[in-house]
Image: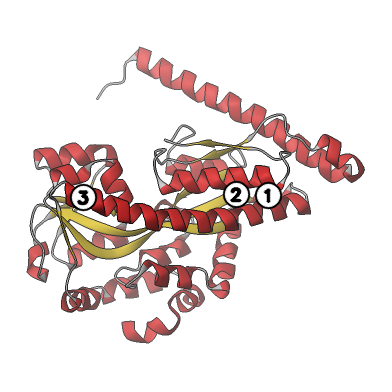
Amino acid sequence: MQITRREKGRFMNRRRLVSAVLVVALACGLTACRNAQGNQADAKESEVQRYAWPLGSSSPEDTVTQIYAEKFAEEVERLSDGSMKISVYPNSVLGGDRELLESCKDGDIPFVVQNTAPQVTFMKDTAVFDMPALFETIDEVREHVDNPEFMELMQQVYRDGGYELLGYADQGFRVMTTNKKVENLSDFKGQKIRTMENSYHMAYWKALGASPTPMTFSEVYIGLQQGTIDAQENPYEVIVSNKLYEQQDYVVETNHLPHLISLIVSEEFFDSLTDEQQQIIKEAADTAKEYAREQSDARIASRMDTIRESGTEIITPSEELYNEIRELCKPIYASIENSVSQEIIDAYLGDMQEELQ
């Protein structure tokens, strides 16, 4: 599709505006930080920011991702007695997932909150989260993710990439929606399911006999409506906020992957802060993570009620089917183990590793 000169002009003007906002905000913010480091005696009087530091997200406003980001910003301001301020920019205002990662690494956007899936291109060890059909409950996922040994290893992965990892919240598991009742493995066969353009995600659906079809998310609703695709997979939060259930008769709780949300900060920016400021950011991140998880659990229950009330049926597969699926996933585990540090795999899986052999 051709972009008109007028549309191109609007796009360029928008980019210039966003760039200008970031340049002013960061220039003032970083100056405040450096002044604080070099002049500790006058810190209390000089540390107040004139402009808030930007935090970018590609997610819509009514999501756990936004709740996580806003709670973090709120806690940073509270713990610093108002001397540190963060402004949250959702809906890809500052760029899509790839652009946010690049801008964060360069120090242009200090903070980013996003799903881990787009990060595999930048940090291959984050593919550990693409190992499918591992966990039965989200509490089990959180226990493994919060393992201090695992977190320490992942924090080093992010540092090597130019970021500081502050924590992982989540939106529960990713589940399947479809117009075909799924009760047996054969029911997946041939279904055209929209996936993200992630080779491990696609390998999972291929293993089940489905036909994974990468597609821009904005096209999913109309794709279901017009029959371009038969099914899609996302967390409950996304399924309801985008009304995808309106075009589907069933939700199948495949729970194939946890939908993890990372909170990261530019390493360059983080290193420019005082020790006290760094501690405030870490403490705020911990509080925001726990709050986001609580909100996620409550919202999933509410989203499931919304789906049921619409007449769409929620199917929980049998334990036998789950076991069949896990068996089919073994080649995917092997593929991921070949590209991810064994130390990280061991710390993430713990005692589960023996079950996957």
Q: Indicate which disc residue 270 carries.
A: 1
Packing grade of label 2 (10 A; few <14, some 14-19, many >=20) is: many
Q: Position of residue 327 (x, y in %)?
A: 22, 78
SS of the residue under disc 1: helix
Q: Position of residue 154 (x, y in %)?
A: 54, 65
Q: Judge left or right: residue 299 versus residue 72.
A: left
Residue nearest the viewer, comparing 34 with 74 = 74
Seen in the picture, residue 52 relative to 175 is either above or below; the reply is above
Q: Position of residue 236 (x, y in %)?
A: 29, 52
Seen in the picture, residue 110 relative to 8 is either above or below; the reply is below
Which amino acid type corresponds to the residue marked 2 in the rendered image? Val
Between tags 3 and 2, which lies in front? Answer: 3
Image label count? 3
Report the residue at 42% width, 38% height from top. 61
Q: Judge left or right: residue 145 versus residue 29.
A: left
Q: Judge left or right: residue 11 versus residue 253.
A: right
Q: Indicate which disc residue 307 carries.
A: 3
Report the residue at 25% width, 75% height from top. 326
Between tags 3 and 1, which lies in front? Answer: 3
- Contact between labelled residues 1 and 2, with CB atoms less than 8 Å apart: yes
Q: Indicate which disc residue 265 carries.
A: 2
